Image (spheres, rainbow, N blue to C red):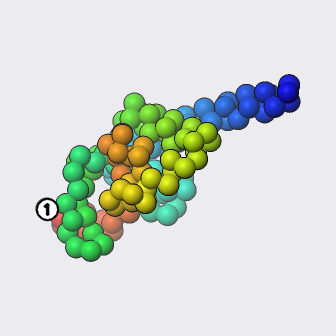
Amino acid sequence: MEVTSEILTLEVMHRFVVCIFEAFFTQKGFIGEGGATPGKAIMQLRVVTCDSIVALDANTVRVYPAGDLGLGWALLRSFIKNFSYAFIFPICCTMYFFQHNRTAYDHICGSIVVEEYPQQFVRNRN
């Protein structure tokens, strides 16, 4: 029983470190709006704020206000995401029930994960 409690303690400590790491990178974009962990940045994805979504065509949407999350929302999103993966695994499957593949923690925190557009499109979108 002692080994199990030590492993659980290590897992919780690991989750806290992961949450801080993820929140640090998703709170604010280093280039443009929206933050991204290193993996999301490689895949050209960003996490941005989302109050409303307007469909432009079948594969494109416009997200408002599409800004930085900020540290508070990034921490909350990260904690809900990582602890639900660790202890309540089926909650990660909620993305199949929400529009635009948003997860429950994205809805709670008012965020969405989006693909980056080429810079010339971003400048000419207004």
User: Where is mark 1, residue-wise?
Assistant: 126
Relative to the observer, which residue lies in front, 76 or 98?
Answer: 98
Quarter placement of the N terminus: top right
Residue 29 visible in image: no
Task: Give residue 9's quadrant in the image.
Answer: top right
Pick out the residue farthest to the left.
126
Relative to residue 48, is residue 13 drawn left or right? right
Along the line of sight, the residue nearer the viewer: 2 or 114: 2
Q: Which image quarter holds the C terminus?
A: bottom left
15 left or right of 124 in image: right
- The amino acid on which the numbered mark 1 sits, given as a three-letter code, is Asn
**Of all residues shown, which one is farthest toward the bottom?**
58
The x, y position of residue 122, in whole percent, is 25, 63
On the rendered structure, is 45 left or right of 84?
left
Q: Position of residue 118 (x, y in %)?
A: 33, 68
Instruction: Locate residue 49, reporting x and y percent.
Output: 31, 45
Q: Could you classify mark 1 by the number of other residues whose Cα lies within 10 Å: few (under 14), some (14-19), or many (20 or more)?
A: few
Q: Quadrant of residue 45?
A: bottom left
Q: Image height check: is 115 above or below 25?
A: below
Left or right: 19 in relation to 96? right
Give above or below for 119 relative to 71.
Answer: below
Q: Residue at x 43, y 56 (%)?
A: 95
- What secondary structure is marked by label 1? loop
Give the residue drawn at x 57%, y 38%: 83
Number of marks in the image? 1
In the image, residue 112 sits, relative to residue 4, either above or below, namely below
- Who's the residue at 41% across and 46% down the image? 104
Q: Is residue 104 visible?
A: yes
Residue 116, horizontal then vertical, whole percent? 37, 62
Q: Residue at x 60, y 32 (%)?
A: 16
